[in-house]
Image (tube, rainbow, N blue to C red):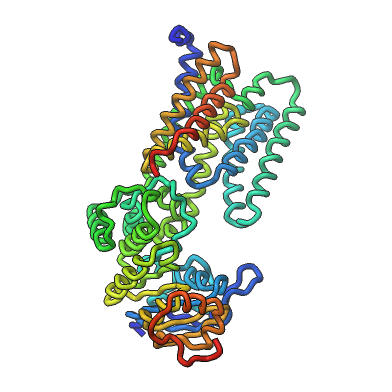
């Protein structure tokens, strides 16, 4: 297994996996406790529109995905606050429109882009150096925001109404959270692809919640689990020549079912 | 004027086009122990949310301690209905109580020593100090309710609002709670939403029944008019078998 690390692409992949798992553990925890899994899935899929637009206009697909993801995140945030009763429907519509738009824009782009599958299903072993250098500050930013506003995020996640009454800026923080989700989505797309983003966001926090008594602990354990799933998945995919993104998700999925069989020690 | 806790004038409220409250008028003075009674869907919780600034009236005026509800919200404490909370949420009793200090703590900063002192104080008051590190999911319904009361008290409230504080708790807790609230009432104005007529008759100083309209009684007595309005209440009356008189006259009920 260790001989794989002599290749630079494997070392890079490992580094990206660890970085993304940390972000995923933090943001995934907030997604799970705030029950915004559906919005997060919507952001991930609609981001495909940005990838299509970037390829069509000829700029970096990662940048295109990032811009699109942030805009869609804000839009979904507004919708979920304005029309509570039909928010899920509208989010589902945006989810599909974003993807459809991406597919049509790519159809209209001359030449076939091989890298495209990488955005749908991830390709952790082919993340360019420039993207890695961009991921490091973004990951630090997410970590900083979460640490600084930890008590506010804990409060709005547990009891939004009470937080509003005691003067916590609930809505601005909700939008900050959605933008952080969007940024994380763009990073995770590189690892497991936009179709599988949700699994990496939700499985580690879901398992971690059973073994932790604080939100910070849940974030830390989720990050560790994410790192573990990514490393195991990466080496299985290297040895058996399977798709890295799907293999990582299958490892996480196996852990998910195992954790269901083991009784929760907490209650 | 200074001793008015809550003032409501000609308040109207509707969710979309469904009217919930129509022409509500109410004046409560500081030191009151006020009970709000009424059927499910009658608008009790809506009225409380209007008091807290969570909802805005379509028409009419609400003043809490002389201020707009949201401006006064840091001067009141709120104990929400003890249902619908995620029991798996990774939060401890102490972390819940600390939320009450958010109105005083600065955003983006940690809690200060005085916040921790206050929380120790209120947790001891409600008898949960030894459970401070316990996970919320390991508590009983009554203990969880006490954690929410501690959180509300940590705000140093001038008015304490409680929404159905005895739902999902055992009967012993109910008796203890009202003794506790009575003692607290020496300093704090208390507003309680409840289904339970027995509790109203033996503890409240004033009482109102809400079912779209509001009928107010300044002496904590129930009129048969109120019971007619809150047709679901007599069920509680029978179930608890309160020994003393809660009805003015024995009517047709």
Residue A149 in sight from this viewpoint: no
In this rendering, the answer to whether B193 lies above or below A48 is below
Residue A2: x and y in percent read 43, 9
Q: Quadrant of residue B12?
A: bottom right
User: What residue lies at 32% left-to-right and 72% top-to-bottom?
Assistant: B181
In this rendering, the answer to whether A102 lies above or below B14 is above
Residue closer to the observer: B227 or B125: B227
User: What residue lies at 52% left-to-right and 42% top-to-bottom?
Assistant: A179
Residue B200: x and y in percent read 41, 79
In this rendering, the answer to whether A175 lies above or below B32 is above
Lateral position of residue A235 relative to residue A82, left or right: left
Q: Specify the quadrant that holds the C terminus of chain A.
A: top left
User: What residue lies at 41% left-to-right and 29% top-to-bottom?
Assistant: A224
Residue closer to the observer: A33 or B167: B167
Lateral position of residue A40 relative to residue B154, left or right: right
Residue B146 in sight from this viewpoint: yes
How many marks are shown on the rendered structure?
0
Residue B223: x and y in percent read 48, 88
Lateral position of residue B59 relative to residue A208, left or right: right
User: What residue lies at 62% left-to-right and 28% top-to-bottom?
Assistant: A61
Residue closer to the observer: B133 or B142: B142
Q: Quadrant of residue A3?
A: top left
In this rendering, the answer to whether A18 lies above or below B191 is above
Residue B18: x and y in percent read 64, 71
């Amino acid at each position: 297994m260790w001989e794989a690390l002599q290749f630079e692409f494997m070392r890079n992949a490992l580094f990206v996996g660890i970085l993304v798992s940390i972000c995923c553990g933090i943001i995934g925890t907030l997604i799970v406790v705030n029950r915004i899994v559906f919005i997060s899935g919507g952001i991930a899929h609609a981001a495909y529109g940005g990838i299509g637009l970037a390829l069509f206009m000829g700029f970096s697909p990662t940048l295109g995905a990032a811009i699109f993801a942030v805009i869609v995140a804000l839009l979904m945030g507004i919708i979920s606050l304005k029309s509570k009763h039909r928010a899920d429907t509208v989010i589902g519509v945006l989810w599909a429109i974003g993807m459809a738009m991406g597919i049509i824009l790519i159809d209209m782009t001359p030449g076939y882009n091989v890298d495209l599958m990488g955005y749908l299903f991830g390709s952790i072993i082919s993340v360019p150096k420039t993207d890695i250098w961009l991921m490091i500050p973004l990951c630090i930013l997410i970590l900083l925001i979460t640490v600084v506003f930890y008590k506010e995020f804990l409060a709005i996640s547990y009891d939004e109404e009470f937080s509003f009454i005691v003067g916590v800026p609930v809505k601005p923080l909700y939008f900050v959270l959605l933008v952080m989700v969007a940024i994380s989505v763009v990073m995770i797309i590189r690892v497991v692809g936009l179709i599988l983003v949700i699994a990496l966001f939700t499985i580690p926090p879901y398992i971690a919640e059973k073994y932790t008594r604080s939100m910070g602990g849940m974030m830390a354990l989720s990050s560790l689990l994410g790192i573990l799933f990514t490393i195991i998945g990466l080496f299985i995919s290297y040895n058996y020549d399977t798709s890295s993104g799907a293999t990582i998700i299958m490892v996480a999925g196996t852990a998910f079912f195992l954790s269901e069989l083991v009784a929760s020690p907490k209650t | 004027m200074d001793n008015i806790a809550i003032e409501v004038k000609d308040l109207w409220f509707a969710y979309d086009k469904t009217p919930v409250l129509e022409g509500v008028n109410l004046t409560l003075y500081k030191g009151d122990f006020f009970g709000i009674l009424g059927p499910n869907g009658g608008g009790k919780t809506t009225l409380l949310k209007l008091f807290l600034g969570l909802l805005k009236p379509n028409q009419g005026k609400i003043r809490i301690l002389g201020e707009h509800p949201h401006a006064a919200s840091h001067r009141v404490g709120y104990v929400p209905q003890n249902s619908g909370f995620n029991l798996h949420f990774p939060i401890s009793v102490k972390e819940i109580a600390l939320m009450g200090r958010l109105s005083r703590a600065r955003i983006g900063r940690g809690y200060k020593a005085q916040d921790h002192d206050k929380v120790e104080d209120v947790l001891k008051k409600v008898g949960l100090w030894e459970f401070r590190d316990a996970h919320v999911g390991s508590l009983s319904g009554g203990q969880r309710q006490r954690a929410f009361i501690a959180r509300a008290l940590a705000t140093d409230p001038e008015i304490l609002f409680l929404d159905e504080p005895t739902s999902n708790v055992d009967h012993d807790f109910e008796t203890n709670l009202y003794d506790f609230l009575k003692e607290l009432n020496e300093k704090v104005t208390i507003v309680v939403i409840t289904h339970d007529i027995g509790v109203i008759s033996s503890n409240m100083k004033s009482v109102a029944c809400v079912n779209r309209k509001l009928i107010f009684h300044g002496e904590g007595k129930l009129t048969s008019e109120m019971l007619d309005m809150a047709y679901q209440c007599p069920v509680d009356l029978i179930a608890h078998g309160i020994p003393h008189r809660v009805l003015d006259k024995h009517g047709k009920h």
